Amino acid sequence: DPIRAAARYILEGKIIALKGLGGFHIACDATNDSVVKRLRALKKRGDKPFALMAPDLETVERFCFLNDKERELLTSPRCPILLLEAREDAWKVISRDVAPRNRYIGFMLPYTPLHHLLLRETKRPLVMTSGNLRDEPIVKDNDVALEKLSGIADYFLLHNRDIATRIDDSVARVIDGKEVLIRRARGYVPAPLSLAFTSDKEILALGPMMKSTLCFLRGRRAFLSQYLGDNDIYDNYLYLLEIKERLEKLFGFNPELVVHDLHPDYPTTRLASEMGLPSLAVQHHEAHLASVLAEKGLVDAEVIGVAFDGTGYGRDGRIWGGEFFIGRVGNFERRAHIAYFPLPGGEKAIEEPWRIALALLKEVLGEEALETPWAVKLRTNHNLEAVLRLAETERLSPLTSSAGRLFDGVSSLLSIRHRITYEAQAAIELEMAADPEVTDS
């Protein structure tokens, strides 16, 4: 019996690649420290948390706090990965390497017969992470899995049902009793969203470069694609083209207008220019604000809108991300923003938040930034003087108003995280370090 054999291998500390609903999963025993560490190294995943699959709701409740809304979502047909606050003693059983320095565990329940049968045999939580190489699309075909995942998986659990459309697991969280989607994919796509307005044109929106999705607008309905990854990676760009064509065929879309990010060099901006359709460039954070207003049915309202983000191309050519707008959809005026500060070395500063911290200190203290206890401690392993000089040249240190980058810098100033191994790690660990007992009252 292949399923019993796969379960036995997992309990022996092996890594299994198995064919799921929208692509391959890579699974191992979440309670086995050494195999979780090995999987992390083989996937080149840094400290980014792994998703877990539990045999049943009782197992999830053993390790995490659950409210009624969270139970409802976990057991719903959509069955997303749900971010849940871990009980203090959870880490006595589950490997801490599942989610280093994190108070939350991403749990889901089995949603295919294969998952149910496998978890019935293992009777414990399993790491159930996407079957892909780092930052690439999830693998969906047996032959590709055997080729690409052979350096990660010890064994493969395959079947002969072809997967037509690759799609990742959705990720959600319950905040103030309401479901908030973090990654919209399996279970939610391609169901449309109903809007409070009617478009007189069929529109295709191509999204940004990072964490991209497509959106087709027809009448009062918006049809969003699944999460497509970062389209500066060529395989993800091909994935975007594949899903665009599939949605066009599935729903008979024939867009009359294509919308794209204001950034001139994004792959989606170039794609828009090649489609032979009228096009419209939209500023990244104005799009964020407009999407919230559309979701809340407030498209005609005049609002004060705040857009806090990591990175977005601004109308002045700088990197925005901490913006305050006044106006209504289609006519926003940027009235204020977080004061610009430099990113010494550009992209390198995102990978090494200590550079941002140093630049922030320089803005406040000038050269005395080098004499602070934080800088003195860092100096032994970092060339602070060279980075300070770098911060003075805008060509090498672009200016930003990004709230995300500000959080990164504060994380380093508090000696929480000086270098990251996955996106937003410094800000996430800053959130995890915040006292959960502190409230507004």
Image (cartoon, rainbow, N blue to C red):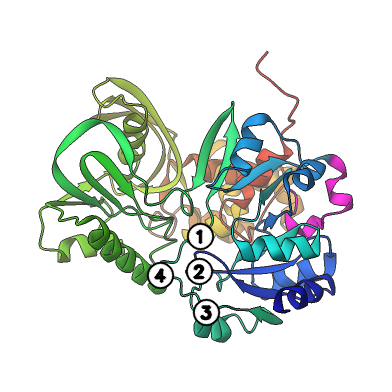
Q: Is residue 235 above or below residue 312?
A: below
N-term-proximal mark, 2 vs 1: 2
N-term-proximal mark, 2 vs 4: 2
Q: Is residue 212 above or below residue 309?
A: below
Residue 194 location (% of width, % of height): 31, 35
For this view, does 187 lie left or right of residue 375? left
Outermost residue, top direction? Answer: 441
Q: Residues within 10 Å of mark 4 (few under 14, many from 20)?
A: few
Pointers 3 and 1 in contact (C-beta within 8 Å) = no
The residue type indicated by label 2 comes to: Ile
The magenta stretch is: 88-102
On the image, which quarter does residue 395 sit in?
bottom left
Residue 156 location (% of width, % of height): 65, 80
Q: Which residue is mark 1?
A: 168
Q: Residues within 10 Å of mark 1 (few under 14, many from 20)?
A: many
Which residue shows up at 69% across the image and 56% down it?
Answer: 53
Q: Which residue is mark 2?
A: 138
